[in-house]
């Protein structure tokens, strides 16, 4: 008895040898791969239709076909399908990693070219086409101010809206609000920029500015808040729903009014999750270019007043330098892109780490 | 979304965790507990019954707070309505001034004394580049998501999943810059090769120049939406009940059959949601396309010749030298984009809401 048991353990398909399905030997897959590559090289260079890239691509296709045929002959159709799909899934992974690695590599290699003190201490004011200097100080100031104001607007509004949806809202109206928050997540950033252009820059700002429309960092902040609001509402809503109901019921049983329960019990419990959502929303807003382009105008000089005159932002700086004809512009663009990515990634990583420590989970 | 049964049903399950981990909030609530109950008990002698409960005040904190949250909730509806109203208000004068048909004219010169502009080519370019991007990105993204959730070793899967989440946060302007500076030359080579060998297909016809084409824009878009779709669908795949997967395997299914019968059907609403989110981002993408497309104003299915344009990219490119009518024209095009994304989103949400109830009751 013991011998049969151990032999069963060593062989995963626990059947007598005669009943076990025939399997391809372990060396079959590499052998097919080598054969496919050789065949595709012979084909490509024989007819002369391409270079090494085509050899690899054609080789991969031939490998899939060969693998399917071999497995189909030896192991049967189901196993052949299984092997082909698993090869496809692995190749999808490799296929996607290549460009993403290239993006990261380019970002780091080109971005470090101008990564010096001058870049962070100067603006683009009076920097001509032949000037190798120039930096992003004004853009960094703009990004921080715009995102900061947008956060100040959005966080209270978003959290209150989520509280309404989760705690107070009943029936059709609450459902409508939820639905439109979902819809709002899909509003393109350029449309939110156009909205603030049509609403704030062209209609409201002339009141403060002697009848002339004026770009400002505050307008950009408004556009960013339109983008941040649905993200914050959704994440806060999720978090509020995760707060255990007995917690609320305990507070009600002690006679605490509902608003105090929400402010003193529900919100503190959900706080880490809410902060995570807010940080992710900030990270997304910091990378937006289009609304800033439309309503803040972008300028070369340092402007610390978000309520008057043009302001730039890091992402807009990248875009403008990318379109600049100066031969020094690409280096500035890449360094600004690296700075922007670093800023966004720091926020995102911090948010994810915070989310991991969150006690509330599904 | 029935809240009432949900709360009472969960009452027993969360009990121990509540007392262990929420000491501070519980203590805080006990401290404030007395005031509302003791001040307003009409009988005073007997406990229990409705008499012990405080009457609702007309101008209490409760009402004020409730009104505040209601106002915040309504703000969302107001914003959506305001977007539509202001865009329409600014677009109508420009549309009136347009001397050509807005829907069919292929061109964009709204700044002249005889403004001429049409949305046709732009809307076509928007849909074409987004469709191309999704066509490339969705299969690959689902492949990666399945790899990360069901094929890769657990540690590696988690680490790579984290990386994918980070890549999803990379701003689009970075992808655009990369597409223009790095990716355009391999795509140009590939386009020349396609043109040489498959030039008889209209998609790959034309006689150059190649490079800044719909293909480049679509590929950059695909690479951009790939992390988003991957990260969302990976999360969905990870949530598949283990029981379903094990049941499929126990019935003798191969791994692919298990994925096909247990994981993919369970994750379908999530996949649709992820696709739609990717589509929404692709449709509205501005800067990456403004940097990579060669701007033209004609309707053409040719993928590899320089050209292509989208509504959003056109707004970014033409905004600088737009006058009053030009701005109105751009706002009108933005309104069309808004309508397209709104339709896509509402359709997606409708599908998800209907499916969600189904899967939740089935699971």
Image (cartoon, helix red, strand yellow):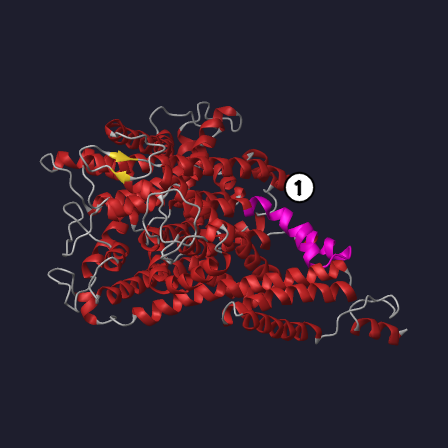
Find numbered disc 1 in the image and state the secondary structure of the residue it sits on: helix
Question: Could one spot residue B220 in this view of the protein?
Answer: yes
Q: Is residue A235 above or below residue A81?
A: above
Does residue A231 show up magenta in the picture?
Answer: no
* Chain letter for the residue marked with disc 1 in the picture: B
The residue located at (15%, 41%) in the rendering is: A214
Left-right relation of B262 to B50: right
Does residue B247 show up magenta in the picture?
Answer: yes
Q: Is residue B202 above or below residue A172?
A: below
Q: Quadrant of the N terminus of chain B?
A: top right
List x then y, in percent, for residue B223.
44, 57
The residue located at (43%, 33%) in the rendering is: A177
* Residue positioned most to the right: A1
List x then y, in percent, for residue A116.
22, 72
Left-right relation of A89 to A275: right
* Location of mark 1 (residue): B362
Q: Is residue B303 above or below residue A88?
A: above
Res A134 quadrant in image = bottom left
Magenta stretch secondary structure, dominant: helix
The residue located at (30%, 68%) in the rendering is: A111
The residue segment tinted magenta is B244-271
List x then y, in percent, for residue A356.
48, 59
List x then y, in percent, for residue A32.
67, 72
Dot 1 surroundings within 10 Å: few (below 14), some, or many (20 or more)?
few
Q: Is residue A231 above or below residue B332?
A: below
The residue located at (9%, 35%) in the rendering is: A210
Res B88 quadrant in image = top left
Res B363 quadrant in image = top right
Question: Could one spot residue A163 in this view of the protein?
Answer: no
Choose between A307 and A278: the one closer to the eye.
Answer: A307
Left-right relation of A75 to B27: right
Choose between A228 and A40: the one closer to the eye.
Answer: A40
């Amino acid at each position: 008895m013991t011998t049969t048991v151990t032999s069963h353990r060593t062989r995963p398909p626990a059947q007598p040898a005669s009943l076990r399905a025939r399997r391809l030997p372990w060396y079959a897959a590499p052998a097919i791969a080598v054969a496919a590559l050789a065949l595709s090289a012979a084909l490509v260079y024989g007819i002369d239709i391409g270079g090494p890239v085509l050899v690899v691509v054609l080789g991969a296709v031939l490998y899939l076909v060969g693998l399917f045929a071999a497995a189909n002959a030896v192991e049967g159709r189901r196993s052949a399908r299984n092997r082909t799909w698993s090869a496809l899934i692995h190749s999808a992974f490799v296929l996607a990693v290549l460009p993403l690695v290239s993006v990261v590599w380019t970002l780091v290699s080109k971005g470090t070219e101008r990564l010096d003190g001058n870049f962070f201490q100067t603006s683009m004011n009076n920097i001509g086409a032949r000037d190798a200097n120039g930096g992003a100080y004004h853009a960094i100031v703009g990004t921080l101010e715009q995102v900061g104001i947008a956060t100040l607007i959005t966080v209270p509004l978003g959290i209150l809206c989520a509280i309404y949806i989760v705690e107070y809202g009943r029936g059709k109206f609450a459902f409508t609000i939820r639905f439109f928050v979902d819809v709002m997540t899909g509003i393109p950033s350029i449309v939110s920029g156009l909205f603030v252009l049509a609403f704030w820059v062209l209609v409201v700002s002339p009141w403060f500015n002697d009848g002339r429309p004026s770009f400002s960092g505050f307008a950009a902040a408004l556009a960013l808040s339109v983008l941040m609001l649905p993200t914050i509402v959704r994440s806060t809503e999720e978090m509020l729903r995760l707060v255990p109901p007995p917690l609320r019921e305990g507070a009600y049983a002690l006679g605490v009014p509902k608003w105090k329960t929400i402010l003193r019990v529900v919100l503190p419990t959900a706080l880490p999750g809410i902060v995570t959502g807010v940080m992710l929303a900030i990270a997304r807003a910091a990378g937006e270019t289009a609304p800033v382009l439309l309503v803040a105008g972008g300028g070369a000089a340092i402007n610390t007043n978000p309520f008057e005159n043009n302001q730039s932002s890091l992402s807009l700086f990248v875009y403008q330098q990318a379109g600049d004809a100066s031969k020094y512009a690409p280096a500035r663009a890449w360094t600004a892109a690296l700075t922007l990515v670093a800023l966004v990634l720091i926020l995102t990583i911090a948010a994810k780490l915070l989310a991991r420590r969150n006690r509330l989970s599904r | 979304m029935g809240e009432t049964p949900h709360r009472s049903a969960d009452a027993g399950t969360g009990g121990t965790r509540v007392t262990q981990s929420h000491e501070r909030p519980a203590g805080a609530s006990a401290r404030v507990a007395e005031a509302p109950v003791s001040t307003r008990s009409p009988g005073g002698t007997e406990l229990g019954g409705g008499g012990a409960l405080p009457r609702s005040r007309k101008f209490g904190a409760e009402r004020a707070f409730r009104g505040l949250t209601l106002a915040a909730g309504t703000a969302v509806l107001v914003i959506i309505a305001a977007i539509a109203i202001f865009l329409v208000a600014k677009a109508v004068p420009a549309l009136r001034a347009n001397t050509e048909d807005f829907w069919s004219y292929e061109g964009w010169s709204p700044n002249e004394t005889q403004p001429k502009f049409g949305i046709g080519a732009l809307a076509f370019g928007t849909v074409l580049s987004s469709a191309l991007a999704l066509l490339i990105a969705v299969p690959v993204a689902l492949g990666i998501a399945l790899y990360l959730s069901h094929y890769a070793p657990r540690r590696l899967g988690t680490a790579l999943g984290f990386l994918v989440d980070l890549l999803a946060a990379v701003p689009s302007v970075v992808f655009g810059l990369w597409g223009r500076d790095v990716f355009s030359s391999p795509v140009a080579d590939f386009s020349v090769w396609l043109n040489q060998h498959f030039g008889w297909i209209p998609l790959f016809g034309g006689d150059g120049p190649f490079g800044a084409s719909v293909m480049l824009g679509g590929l950059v878009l695909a690479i951009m939406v790939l992390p988003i779709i991957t990260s969302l669908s990976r999360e969905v795949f990870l949530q598949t009940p283990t029981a379903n997967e094990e049941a499929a395997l126990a019935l003798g299914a191969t791994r692919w059959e298990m994925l096909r019968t247990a994981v993919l059907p369970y994750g379908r609403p999530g996949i649709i949601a992820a696709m739609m989110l990717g589509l929404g981002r692709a449709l509205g993408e501005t800067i990456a396309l403004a940097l990579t497309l060669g701007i033209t104003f004609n309707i053409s299915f040719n993928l590899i010749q320089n050209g292509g344009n989208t509504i959003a990219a056109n707004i970014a490119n033409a905004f600088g030298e737009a006058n009053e009518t030009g701005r109105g024209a751009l706002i009108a095009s933005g309104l069309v984009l808004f309508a397209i994304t709104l339709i896509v989103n509402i359709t997606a949400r409708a599908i998800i809401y209907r499916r969600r109830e189904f899967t939740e009751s089935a699971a």
